Image (tube, coloured by chain):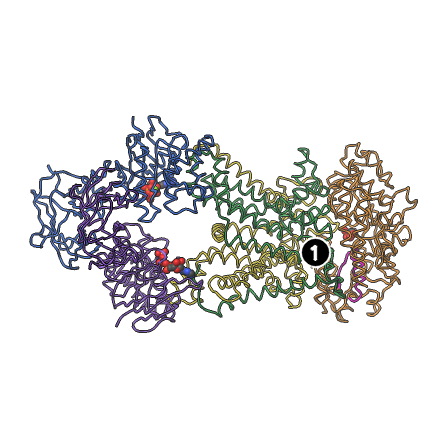
Chain colours: A yellow, B green, C blue, D purple, E orange
Amino acid sequence: MIENRPWLTGFSHLVLILGVLVVALPVWVAIVASTHPANAFGVGHIPLWFGDQAFANWHQVLIGKEGQASQVLRMTLNSLIMALGITFGKIAISLLSAYAIVFFRFPFRGLAFWVIFFTLMLPVEVRIVPTYEVVANLNLLNSYTGLTLPLIASATATFLFRQCFMSIPGELVEAARIDGAGPIRFFFDILLPMSRTNIAALFVILFIYGWNQYLWPLIVTTDDAYYTLVMSVKRMLSVPDGDIEWNKVMVSTLLAMIPPVLVVIGMQKLFVKGLVDAEK
Amino acid sequence: MSVYFPQKLLPYLLLMPQLVVTAIFFLWPAGQAVEQAFYQEDAFGLSRDFVGLDNFTELLTSSEYFASLKTTMVFSFSVAFLGLAVALWLAVMADRVIRGAMVYQTLLIWPYAVAPALAGVLWWILFDPSMGPMALLLESIGIDWNHFVNGDQAMILVVISATWKQISYNFLFFLAGLQAIPRSLIEAAAIDGAGPTKRFWDIVFPLLSPTTFFLLVVNLVYAFFETFGVIDATTQGGPGQSTTTMVYKVFNDGFVGLDLGSSAAQSVVLMVIVGLMTVVQFRYIERKVQY
Amino acid sequence: MSDLVLRNIGKTYANGYQAIPSIDLTIEEGEFIVLVGPSGCGKSTLLRMVAGLESISQGDLLIKGDQVNHKEPAERDIAMVFQNYALYPHMSVYDNMAYGLKNRGEPKSEIETKVNAVAQMLGLEELLTRKPRQLSGGQRQRVAMGRAMVRDPKVFLFDEPLSNLDAKLRVQMRVEIRELQRKLGTTTLYVTHDQVEAMTLADRLVVLNKGHAEQVGTPMALYERPASTFVAQFIGSPSMNLIPSSIENGVLQLGVDSQLACPQFSTDKVMWGIRPEHVDIVPLQDADLSLQVKAVEALGAETLIHGSVKISEDKQYPFVVRLSGNHAPDIGQPIGLRVPQQAWHVFDAETTKRIEPL
Amino acid sequence: MSDLVLRNIGKTYANGYQAIPSIDLTIEEGEFIVLVGPSGCGKSTLLRMVAGLESISQGDLLIKGDQVNHKEPAERDIAMVFQNYALYPHMSVYDNMAYGLKNRGEPKSEIETKVNAVAQMLGLEELLTRKPRQLSGGQRQRVAMGRAMVRDPKVFLFDEPLSNLDAKLRVQMRVEIRELQRKLGTTTLYVTHDQVEAMTLADRLVVLNKGHAEQVGTPMALYERPASTFVAQFIGSPSMNLIPSSIENGVLQLGVDSQLACPQFSTDKVMWGIRPEHVDIVPLQDADLSLQVKAVEALGAETLIHGSVKISEDKQYPFVVRLSGNHAPDIGQPIGLRVPQQAWHVFDAETTKRIEPL
Amino acid sequence: ATQIEWWHAMGGANGEKVVEMAEAFNQAQDTYEVKPVYKGNYTETMTSAIAAFRAKQQPALVQVFEVGTASMMAAEGAIYPVYKLMRETGQPFIQDDYLSAVTGYYTDEDGNMLSMPFNSSTPVLYYNKEQFEKAGVSAPKTWQEMETVSQKLLDSGVECGFTTSWQSWIQLENFSARHNIPFATQANGFAGMDTEFVFNRPAQVAHIEKMREWQQNGIFSYGGRRSDSAPKFYSQECSMFMGSSAGYAGMKRNASFDFGVAQLPYNAEQIETPQNTIIGGASLWVLQGKSEEQYQGVATFLNFLSRADMQADWHQFSGYLPITQAAYELTKGQGFYAANPGTDVAVKQMTSVEPTENSKGLRLGNFVQVRDIINEELEAVWAGDKTAQVALDAAVKRGNALLRKFEKAND
Ligand SMILES: Nc1ncnc2c1ncn2[C@@H]1O[C@H](COP(=O)(O)OP(=O)(O)OP(=O)(O)O)[C@@H](O)[C@H]1O
Ligand SMILES: Nc1ncnc2c1ncn2[C@@H]1O[C@H](COP(=O)(O)OP(=O)(O)OP(=O)(O)O)[C@@H](O)[C@H]1O
Ligand SMILES: O=P(O)(O)OC[C@H](O)CO
Ligand SMILES: [Mg+2]
Ligand SMILES: [Mg+2]
């Protein structure tokens, strides 16, 4: 306790509540907006309190027309496939490469690490045209492979695993060697189970990364069988000279936001632990 | 770790998938970008001329490019600063309250999950000069908000939108950092006669410096490279060029303007910057700041 | 006037756990008091209440006659040395020592004089510009001491200040702390769970057990006349040998064939005890007890013989004998022990309290 | 046949640092060998070479007569207990113990029998389903032992297995390890930097100093006849008192007014030594030496008197005396010491090697 | 059935309509199947198509906005001119059926139509009837009236007189056309690639300078590059809004007040009878590299789209211009204009006079980027950082550099 100043604690709560409110404001507006008719926005101000069109709006977006429900379902599924594909792909290749880098000494190890690390930062947007061409040449347009594989080439995960592996005591490796475990057994029996929290944290980070992609899917797909939720929001926004149907946009925004938010909150403990422990 | 497996071939096999993917989807396109930077080409790729360093000289003599460099700096440092300051402030408060820290964490953590493009949309409509509640609020206190005209306001808008997402991430690290500071240090300072504010600036803040520095780097990288979606969804670089960052410009010139040569040259410049940042970040992470 | 008075002090934590039911203690000026006890017995809690780092749930705390229950730590004029030293890692040694004075607003020149004086006393002059991480464990310990001393407080508080040091350094710093405290004459409250440290440092020892003060007294008093089996086992190493037995008609029934004449006691179910160093080895036929040898540890200067004493068919008790010099009894064989009556300790088997012959 | 032979073994690390120049050692079946020495002297390096965790730069390593220099650790039929135990944190105690057997492909039922047998021997039956983090330090230590034992290896290797435990537990586990090793009869190589542990555990001790074996022998041999000042100071606690002196014509010049008759030695510049426990206190007028008392530590069973012996105007040496029982000399006053000649140790001042009278 | 991919940029309700039209076509026959693919906004759609072409994954048909016309035309090896397609597939195709103001934009020097007009719009003036009534004014015809009307509106308590969307399109490109002055040399680029911008001539400068003044005193209020300023009108902050005729439907939905549509004002001191305005929106381009069968299908589909009933429906639904005379007549006959007053203003404004070489349209390379430049420079004017002259000079200079680049890349 150190000092007895109840007002300080009260003040802290106040600041935190304020912080929570400010952080929540945009989403509050989105939720509220999703309960109003389309023209509630044009006539002036964005409403700050609920309207009565919640059901109508959600209904319209989810099952408005014939076949639309299945389209929403399909987009959700695509978002999920893309997010999970990217997530598991990255985790898998990163685990292997981080394992190689941390637990082996071999020529060109430094080079390999730098090459991987270099990809950490340059986002797809910057190299989108040549990347698109490569994917097209490989005949991967309109495929889940094309959606996911190119985005797997980034090094965040490798880097985090490297940090995490480096904190594993060397004695464990030695104990395993004495127990007759070679590198493969060690990887599966010891390393993987020990990296659970880090894998979980990365799962969250990468899932969100994958789920939130929109430019890439927009470019590599031409088949609406591959559209994703985030794309659909973007699509409702680019209405040349037409009016943007904010109520529906907000419904879709919320729809696209719910799964990753659930993932973050659901895995909060593991996420925080894995993230913070690996970095420090 | 100074213990290694003796196998010689295995590590290459383990690295293979990552390297193959990197080579095909990163190095190859990057190589093409480098090549492209020396050519002038029409959009459809029907004809191309070798122009040597023209694309680069054009770039480096264009005031717009330097303007975007400056914009990038202002933007990145503002995002980093604001994000760190707010998150630290909240983390300090959360560290103080023994009860409920977890609840606050949950309530603060979720914006991390929101797509940058969606975050941009949300803030955009909040600040829309004619219908956004924030704009109206500002107007009611005498601030005429119009980010379509006012470049500084546009910058503020993109900074806020970009920062918003980052606060949760920073908050997590700061809270963990605060909780890792030994209680006894704070107690020693209390015995040494320092009140809560003084303790924060004399003891806590300096001790957080490794976390702060780490977050600074992460936030700068984020603001530099990953805010494309936010800018695209809010200001699209305007008004004027007041929110055109370098990454936005590469995309815009290349993908929207179809000036592939210049865009490729800009990619090359960015790659060099990334290379430098990689070195810096790597050095830092290898031997963390010591206090 | 007593320097530090704890009057019916108690602590109940926010979660309802009563760490300290009630303690009374009066400490005279310049006394060196050691609080000793096993982990979790409430030593730190008590110390931190004195420091003002933990609120006091009940009772009064008086420093030089003033009730300070509700004063901030900084206002109590105490100084504390923490187990991990709690040096500010980003400040130089000088700044670490000067920080408290600066906060008090003392003039720069005065601070300098004071810090330099203390640094010299502790041999830290050369180290003033270093950061804590550039110091060895012993040096850190000394800086922590210096930081406490420089403020010239009414009371020093130490919470296991030596437990992070290795054995050799611990012995050395122990001697230094004692010398310094003698020189400064500052009232000191010192927490440790190491009985050797406690014995060698204390003017008076307070043995804590589950938040109770089991016994308060000089180290020798506690060694020679421990008030309970708890104190008896805690003070002295190896621990006192204790064997449950009964006394009947002036005869101590120690088992199978050991019956020792003994004075009359008020109770008959007792714990009979003797320290390992008070036992002699004698030929089996002259022996009071017979010890089945299990292990022998020869340390050069002395030998520890671990074994067990059989009381009945199915009961035997571990028993240690400590002898000067080098001895090598055969493992697995019995040896004879003599247990002189003047070295006996007898405790009530039920209350565990010491009892004296009638 | 000798169980473990180190023939001219040496280690030079990749960075060019020569951690071990050359060591020869032959270990008989069932022997308990302790490697002891200060930090960084190469103990772990040597042990890890035996384990196969570190490549051998030179020489031969033979286990039961086979040269195993290039064998994988798992093929050497050794087991190792690490300082921090290196238990697999995500596996239960059972799985930790069974892992090596599983990797060998032993049938499930057999594994179960073996693990259960060892668990019973170590009192771990109740803990088999727990994870390491749910165990106390001593329990973890025991699991680490169990993991080593279950494989029934030819050689046990221990690298400071007790140094993470607190003092009481260390004493207890030390006795346990010794008993177990006796029971199993497995050849053991044990690394520690704690001399008490070394003395009490070893059949033979190897004292390492900068990668050299300074002396190899039984604990008592090393205590009684240390081969160098290094060994003399390392073995025994408190350390042997050492004073540089010169011998002239059968007289040991110990300073201001201490001259002791002594036998002839081959050298005249010597280090003269005596263990604290071999000194007696006598009235000043009968004394061989006079000790200025600085601090007295009464531990109940014994008393340590710290002080210094003056050699010349500007030179004095710290000196410790260890007495049985309770003594209370005045601090700051001189007391008289007697130093019996049969307890002397004399070393060549230059080579630091032990020298015997001519 | 032969698959035909059609990439378009129609989001929202228009997007659904596009899908409907394709469905209708697919229902009507079973030899071909048109697959509409939404590829983002205009720029995203165009660049996706180009990227796809480079990777040989292009669609047969793509919707490209008017700004991209020059880039498409210059890419001779990439496009399949519509007139040629129609001829070679033997589809009936009479160019004269189309409104000349529309086709003019998309024809080559020899008058051949290179792309198929689809959704063409033109800017008009929307005004708030209720506020006008209250202030006692009627829709301004000239820019001079614009000022006085606005002033009266302001006096009556309105916050701002007018706002505009698509500033380059309306305030410079159409402004130039309407006053019959060149926007660029070489007949706005129609006569050759060696064209240069000239929109920094006194007439345009004066107009922009005036707007700058208005921005300061509240008569004009800038609200964003595309149609982001529409809410200013919806919320009755501004009484007038200059925007695409295609915005009518949205206007209808969002405005809770009565509004009117009028022609774009002109500067009476510059010209007596104003010229026609030029079109915006997009046309459909056929890309090279597909099979004959597919082209057959594309041609059939284009013909289907041009049918009067299809066009009339699209026109009435979206507010885009009827691109054929027949569609216009049909709509009129259906009584649509009478029921929806103002919906024919755009057509009238477009067709009232014969286009001149200054009002036929624009054919300028790299124009997407030039639009960005103009946006940037104009924004500097509105913000008060630059004078009109300085800004337009800068825009011309930067724009010309891009023209030269385009010329170099495409010769
Ligand atoms: N903040 C707290 N809330 C609840 N219980 C506490 C708190 N701090 C300590 N305790 C409990 O109070 C008892 C005494 O703790 P204390 O730290 O004083 O022990 P200690 O004697 O210093 O032990 P050690 O030798 O391990 O430091 C312990 O049982 C502990 O678990
Ligand atoms: N991988 C290595 N590369 C280079 N030098 C090393 C390496 N490992 C150890 N050393 C050095 O070899 C020497 C012996 O190290 P070793 O670990 O064997 O010491 P130790 O006796 O076990 O010490 P401690 O008691 O501290 O464990 C040390 O000086 C150490 O710095
Ligand atoms: O919004 P639209 O479809 O009328 O098109 C507007 C023009 O493309 C602006 O250049
Ligand atoms: Mg404690
Ligand atoms: Mg070691």
The residue to which callout 1 is attached is E40
In this view of the protein, can residue C113 be seen by the observer? yes
Chain letter, disc 1 residue: E
For the point 12% across and 47% down, the residue is C339
Residue B118 % position (x, y): 63, 49
- For the N terminus of chain C, the image quarter is top left
Q: Between residue D1 and residue C351, name the one nearer to us.
A: D1
Q: Quadrant of residue C231?
A: top left
Direction from residue D89 to residue C320 in the image, left or right:
left
Q: Is residue E176 magenta-colored?
A: no
Direction from residue E343 to residue D19 in the image, left or right:
left
Residue D85 position (above or below residue E165): below
Direction from residue E291 to residue C227 in the image, left or right:
left
Residue E227 % position (x, y): 74, 47
Q: Residue furthest right?
A: E272
- For the C terminus of chain C, the image quarter is top left
Q: Is residue E66 magenta-colored?
A: yes
Quadrant of the image where one finds ligand 1: top left
Q: Between residue C247 and residue E381, name the one nearer to us.
A: E381
What range is drawn magenta here?
A: E61-77
Residue B175 position (above or below residue C21): below
Q: Quadrant of residue D205?
A: bottom left
Direction from residue B203 to residue C307 in the image, left or right:
left
